[in-house]
């Protein structure tokens, strides 16, 4: 029975990881993240890291493999998203200048 459980786990792990792959490839290739929520991706990546730790502690190979691959891909996407958000922020100097311009009397 444990072999059957591991097989089911491996199939589920492969399917869920592969379902994530097209989005990861698209974002990595295009660097476009407009449709991705930073908060969601940060939580998702943290959750995947938690599942990886759980898999290691439980000795669950399917959980370890799936979440190790997904964590790498999700981390890359998260970094790309963070860079996009930071790049879209107005510079502090520009913001200061814009808000400190004297009003004409």
Image (cartoon, rainbow, N blue to C red):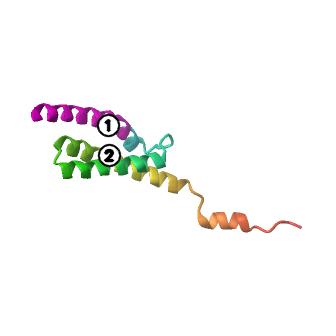
Determine the secondary structure under disc 2: helix
The residue at the point 35 percent across, 39 percent down is 25
- Quadrant of residue 22 in the image? top left
Q: Residue furthest right?
A: 105
Residue topped by disc 1: 21
Residue topped by disc 2: 73
How would you classify the magenta stretch by its main secondary structure?
Answer: helix
**Left or right of 103, for residue 35:** left
- Quadrant of residue 17 in the image? top left
Residue 17 drawn in magenta: yes
At label 1, counting other C-alpha atoms closer than 10 Å, the crowd grade (few under 14, some 14-19, many 20 or more) is: some
The residue at the point 20 percent across, 35 percent down is 9
**Image marks 2 and 1: residues in contact by CB distance under 8 Å:** yes
At label 2, counting other C-alpha atoms closer than 10 Å, the crowd grade (few under 14, some 14-19, many 20 or more) is: many
* Residue bounds of the magenta highlight: 1-25
Residue 28 in picture, x, y percent from top left: 37, 44
The residue at the point 38 percent across, 37 percent down is 23
Residue 42 drawn in magenta: no
Residue 81 in picture, x, y percent from top left: 45, 49
**Left or right of 19, for residue 9:** left
Cα distance between the residues tagged 2 and 1: 8 Å
Q: In terms of sequence position, does the residue under pointer 2 or pointer 1 come before the other? A: 1
Pick whichever, 38 or 8, lies toward us.
8
Quadrant (top left/top right/bottom left/bottom right) for the C terminus? bottom right
Note whether 20 is above or below 78 in the view shown: above
Residue 24 in picture, x, y percent from top left: 36, 40
Residue 76 in view of the camera? no
Indicate which disc residue 85 carries. Answer: none
Quadrant (top left/top right/bottom left/bottom right) for the N terminus? top left
């Amino acid at each position: 029975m444990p072999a059957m459980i591991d097989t089911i786990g491996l199939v589920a792990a492969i399917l869920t990881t592969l379902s994530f792959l097209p989005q990861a490839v698209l974002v990595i290739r295009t660097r476009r993240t407009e449709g991705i929520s930073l908060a969601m991706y940060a939580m998702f990546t943290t959750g995947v890291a938690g599942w990886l730790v759980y898999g290691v502690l439980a000795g669950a190979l399917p959980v370890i493999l799936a979440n190790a691959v997904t964590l790498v891909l999700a981390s890359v996407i998260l970094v790309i998203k963070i860079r996009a958000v930071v790049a879209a922020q107005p510079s502090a100097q520009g913001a200061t200048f814009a808000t400190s311009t004297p009003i004409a009397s």
